[in-house]
Amino acid sequence: MAEGIYSCPQGIQQRFPNNPLLKEIGAESYLGVRLTNLAGDTLGSLCVIDSKPLAYPQRATDILRFLRPE
C-alpha cells in the first residue's frame, strides 16, 4: 500500500496469517487503494475483499487507479 495500490488476487489469508478477520470473513482476494486529499494527506483506503480469487486483477487495479490521481 506504500505505492497507493495493493492487489492480492488470491491467497490473502496465507499472505497475512495473523489477521483473524480475513479468516472470519472467508477472504480469498484483496484489492485496495489509498485515498488522499489534494494536499496528498492520507484520508483512508477503499478496498474490495472477496471470497473468490480476482478474475481480472489487472482490470480491477486499473479501475482503482482513477481514484488515485498521480
Image: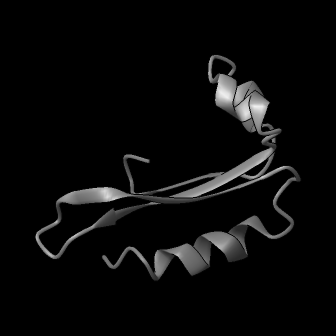
Quarter-of-image position of residue 27 = top right
Does residue 10 lie above or below 11 as drawn?
Answer: below
Residue 16 appears in the figure = no
- Across and down, in percent, residue 25 comes to 77, 39
The answer to which of 45 and 2 lies nearer the viewer is: 45
Q: Residue at x 70, y 70 (%)?
A: 58
Residue 11 appears in the figure = yes
Q: Is residue 59 left or right of residue 38?
A: right
The answer to which of 3 and 46 lies nearer the viewer is: 46
Residue sitting at the far top: 18
Q: Is residue 4 left or right of residue 10?
A: left
Q: Residue at x 35, y 65 (%)?
A: 35
**Count of numbered tags:** 0
Q: Residue at x 48, y 75 (%)?
A: 65
- Across and down, in percent, residue 17 comes to 69, 19
Q: Colour mode?
A: one colour
Does residue 45 lie above or below 63 as drawn?
Answer: above
Q: Where, quadrant-wise, is the C terminus in this rendering?
A: bottom left
Q: Residue at x 70, y 34 (%)?
A: 22
The answer to which of 46 and 4 lies nearer the viewer is: 46
Does residue 59 lie above or below 19 as drawn?
Answer: below
Does residue 30 lie above or below 48 as drawn?
Answer: above
- Across and down, in percent, residue 11 comes to 80, 37
Quarter-of-image position of residue 10 = top right
Q: Is residue 12 left or right of residue 28?
A: left
